[in-house]
């Protein structure tokens, strides 16, 4: 790598930070001395350091890319792959679609996780080519499933029953049950994370939803089960207290709300059924449609703008009107 190439690389990847360019020169000297090592350990050290120096992405993105790159290296070691040249399309696709193992069991990676894994691998191979490695990108022909293929569907009555049983307050605390009660009333993840007890009218059995960038403000009825759960929450709450709380007693973030719902799915043993908070919202909207026969009422319940979006969510066939 000559000085011209170094200048180009510095401008494209590292910006004009002197510390980053100094680290790059040190890396280049090593590569020239060692003759472009291809062992997994060396690749992790060299490419990993380059990831930390990237200036063309936000720090949070850089952290995410490096995390998935290190997981790729760990996957290589686990599968006894010791040389980067042994990675082909099949290996890349296997890693990208690798199931996620956790204390809650095994589940398929989400679309964003697959996309981030592929993005990290592509950036790693781009860095290697920039440093002088001659090797094709094994992810070039890896096609991800459609983002819409796993869209949420309305959960069934039996599935909702299992979710309710998995939120027993005496076992899991009242926040899980409160979350499910709000979802049954049509609240989105964002709305759930910011609602306070003042939004609940226990006498009328309703919740006032403030809306988000994709939903309109509305007041929806609570289910009998949901009202009972929120009465329990009200017993130890003030009007300004958040309904769904994190471990510190503060309002749960949208990420924590998602984690709580994942725990509910795990406790209910319904993982792998494409169930999300929207699935519960669609269940509620379907109850509204079955009661009134009007898609407009279900659309108001969800806070949607589009009737078509509502129809798709509740599984309504416009042609048969059922």
Image (cartoon, helix red, strand yellow):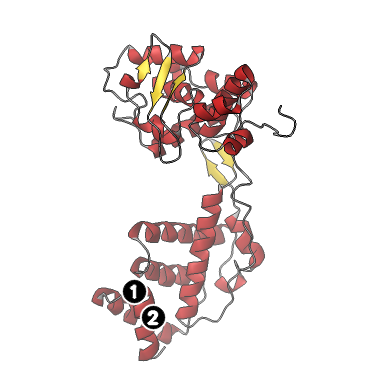
Residue beneath disc 2: 9
Give the mark, 1 or 2, whose residue is nearer the N terminus.
2
Q: Nearer the viewer, residue 241 or 35?
A: 241
Residue 316 in sight here: yes
The image quarter containing residue 101 is top right
Figure disc tally: 2
Asked if the residues shown at circle 1 and circle 2 are in contact, with their CB atoms under 8 angstroms apart, the answer is yes
Residue 91, given in percent of the width and then of the height, sits at: 63, 63
Left or right placement of residue 122 versus residue 253 in this view: right
Q: Is residue 40 left or right of residue 244?
A: right
Q: Residue at x 34, y 31 (%)?
A: 194
Q: Which residue is mark 1?
A: 14
Question: Left of 7 or right of it: where is 222?
Answer: right
Within 10 Å of the Cα at label 2, are there few (<14), some (14-19), or many (20+) other Cα atoms?
some
Residue 212 screen position, x and y as percent: 40, 37
- Evaluate whether residue 273 shows in this view: no
């Amino acid at each position: 790598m000559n000085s011209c190439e170094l200048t180009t690389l510095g401008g494209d990847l590292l910006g004009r930070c002197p510390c980053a360019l100094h680290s790059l020169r040190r890396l280049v000297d090593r590569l020239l001395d060692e003759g472009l090592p291809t062992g997994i350990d060396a690749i992790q050290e060299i490419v990993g350091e380059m990831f930390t120096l990237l200036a063309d992405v936000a720090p949070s993105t850089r952290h995410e890319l490096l995390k998935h790159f290190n997981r790729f290296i760990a996957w290589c070691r686990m599968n006894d792959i010791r040389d980067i040249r042994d990675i082909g399309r099949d290996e890349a696709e296997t890693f990208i679609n690798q199931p996620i193992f956790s204390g809650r069991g095994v589940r398929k990676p989400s679309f964003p996780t697959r996309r981030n894994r592929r993005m990290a691998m592509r950036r790693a191979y781009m860095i290697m080519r920039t440093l002088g490695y001659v090797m094709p990108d094994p992810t070039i022909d890896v096609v991800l499933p459609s983002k819409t293929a796993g869209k949420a569907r309305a959960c069934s009555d039996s599935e909702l029953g299992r979710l309710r049983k998995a939120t027993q307050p005496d076992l899991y605390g009242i926040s899980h049950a409160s979350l499910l009660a709000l979802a049954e009333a049509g609240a989105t993840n964002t709305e759930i994370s910011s609602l306070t007890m003042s939004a609940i009218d226990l006498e009328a059995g309703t919740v006032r939803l403030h809306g988000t960038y994709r939903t309109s403000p509305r007041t929806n009825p609570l289910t009998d089960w949901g009202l009972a759960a929120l009465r329990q929450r009200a017993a130890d709450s003030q009007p300004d207290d958040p309904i769904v709380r994190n471990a510190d007693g503060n309002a749960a973030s949208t990420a924590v709300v998602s984690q709580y719902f994942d725990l509910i799915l795990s406790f209910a043993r319904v993982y792998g059924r494409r169930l999300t908070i929207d699935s519960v919202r669609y269940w509620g909207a379907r109850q509204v449609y079955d009661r009134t026969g009007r898609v407009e009422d279900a659309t108001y319940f969800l806070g949607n703008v589009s009737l078509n979006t509502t129809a798709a969510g509740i599984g309504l066939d416009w042609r048969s009107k059922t």
